Image (cartoon, rainbow, N blue to C red):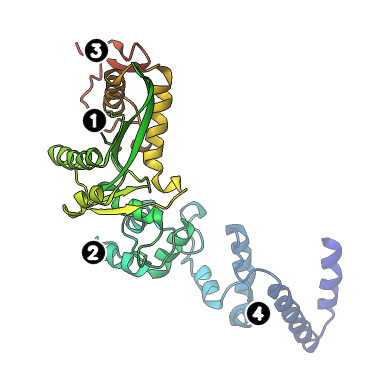
């Protein structure tokens, strides 16, 4: 470094005023070219700022023509001590980040309502939040993978499920081969499952689910849901021929919207399909079922376990029906179906 400065100092010492002006002009041009290849904003440390102030003061008012690393106004503030706070207490450059609490409110409104960023901004103002603008809301939505525009029309199938989850039910048939006096017979049960709560209402078993029987199960479900205080606003089912027009009319007469999912599209009725898989793998596949009563007993025990004891990941590892369980006491195990289904809880004192 000294080898670079010694010739420069020697040259300045022997230069005339005119020569110095030309040299300064050249250095200014060279500095502008170098600055154009660097970031628009250059941050300096407190030590570097002190050096700039120390040597800049000696230049006097001419510093306005020389300084390029910051604006002359910023330099003047440095000189007057207006920005002399310790580095630890100084805010980082750039706009402050949106508080996480406000960010979560924005995302919650977007997910629950489908509002666009302009409407969300209006909701925030109603909540007394005025510290964010349209651009910030839009940026937060995009970063979280949401379309910043409003949801129009019916939207996607996932959006339909989320919007109507509380009053949306899915239905499907459960079948099981049962040993009877006449040999193996296929028995059927129809069930209804709520998308949000995972509550299940199940029929008893029958060997031949005729139109009259299926229609009666629809009526039974509507009455059972009403008795339990459960809302039914929408019902989805597949294209099984056992779902007839009479079956659908039972719901439509009560103001329930019925939607048929397309053929060969099990994912559109995934909640019902998943319940079938659970009851088969966790209970039915472990038994040779002997008669209709035996099947009804197995299914009834499993549904009780499913509602009151089995943790559900989608519900935060809680069962659909919350029971008051003891928080203290000895840990005991309740068994169903000969120990196939187990539930651990604390024995109340």
Which quadrant does the N terminus fall into? bottom right
Compare marks 3 and 4 and give the one earlier in the sequence: 4
Q: CA distance from mark 4 to mark 1?
A: 74 Å
Q: Identify residue for label 3.
A: 347
Residue 32 position (above or below residue 6) = below
Residue 295 position (above or below residue 233) = above
Specify the label residue 282 is tagged with. Answer: none
Q: Residue at coordinates 31% horizontally, 46% vertically from top-left?
A: 243
Q: Nearer the viewer, residue 314 or 208?
A: 208
Q: CA distance from mark 4 to mark 2?
A: 50 Å
Q: Quadrant of residue 40?
A: bottom right
**Mark 4 Cα-neighbour bin, 10 Å: few <14, some 14–19, many ≥20:** some
Q: Residue at coordinates 25% horizontally, 20% vertically from top-left?
A: 327
The residue mark sitting in front, 1 or 3, is: 1
The residue mark sitting in front, 2 or 1, is: 1
Q: Identify residue for label 1.
A: 322
Compare marks 4 and 2 and give the one earlier in the sequence: 4
Marks 2 and 1 close (CB-CB < 8 Å)? no
Q: Residue at coordinates 63% horizontally, 76% vertically from top-left?
A: 67
Q: Identify residue for label 4.
A: 66
């Amino acid at each position: 470094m000294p080898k670079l400065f010694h010739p420069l100092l020697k040259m300045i010492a022997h230069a005339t005023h005119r020569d110095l002006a030309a040299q300064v002009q050249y250095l200014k041009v060279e500095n502008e070219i170098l600055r154009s290849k660097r970031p628009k904003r250059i941050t300096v440390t407190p030590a570097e700022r002190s050096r700039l102030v120390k040597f800049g003061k000696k230049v006097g008012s001419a510093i306005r023509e020389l300084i390029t690393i910051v604006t002359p106004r910023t330099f003047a503030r440095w000189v007057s001590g207006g920005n002399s706070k310790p580095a630890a207490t100084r805010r980082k450059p750039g706009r402050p980040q949106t508080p996480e609490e406000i960010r979560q409110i924005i995302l919650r409104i977007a997910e629950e309502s489908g509002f666009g960023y302009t409407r969300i901004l209006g909701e925030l103002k109603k909540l007394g939040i005025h510290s964010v603008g349209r651009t910030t809301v839009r940026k937060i939505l995009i970063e979280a993978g949401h379309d910043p525009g409003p949801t129009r029309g019916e939207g996607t199938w996932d959006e339909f499920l989320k919007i109507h989850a509380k009053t949306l039910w899915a239905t499907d048939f459960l079948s099981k081969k049962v040993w009877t006096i006449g040999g193996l017979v296929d028995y059927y049960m129809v069930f209804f499952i709520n998308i949000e709560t995972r509550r299940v209402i199940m029929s008893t078993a029958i060997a031949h689910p005729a139109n009259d029987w299926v229609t009666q199960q629809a009526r039974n479900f509507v009455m059972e849901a009403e008795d339990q205080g459960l809302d039914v606003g929408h019902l989805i089912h597949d294209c099984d021929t056992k779902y007839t027009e009479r079956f659908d009319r039972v719901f439509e007469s009560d103001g329930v919207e019925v939607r048929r999912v397309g053929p060969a599209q099990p994912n559109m009725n995934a909640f019902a399909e998943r319940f079938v898989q659970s009851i088969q793998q966790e209970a039915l596949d472990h038994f040779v079922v002997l008669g209709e009563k035996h099947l009804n007993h197995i299914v009834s025990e499993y549904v009780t376990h499913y509602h009151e004891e089995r943790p559900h990941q989608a519900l935060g590892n809680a069962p659909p029906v919350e029971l008051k369980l003891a928080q203290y006491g000895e840990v005991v195990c309740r068994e169903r179906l000969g120990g196939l289904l187990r539930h651990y809880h604390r024995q109340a004192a």
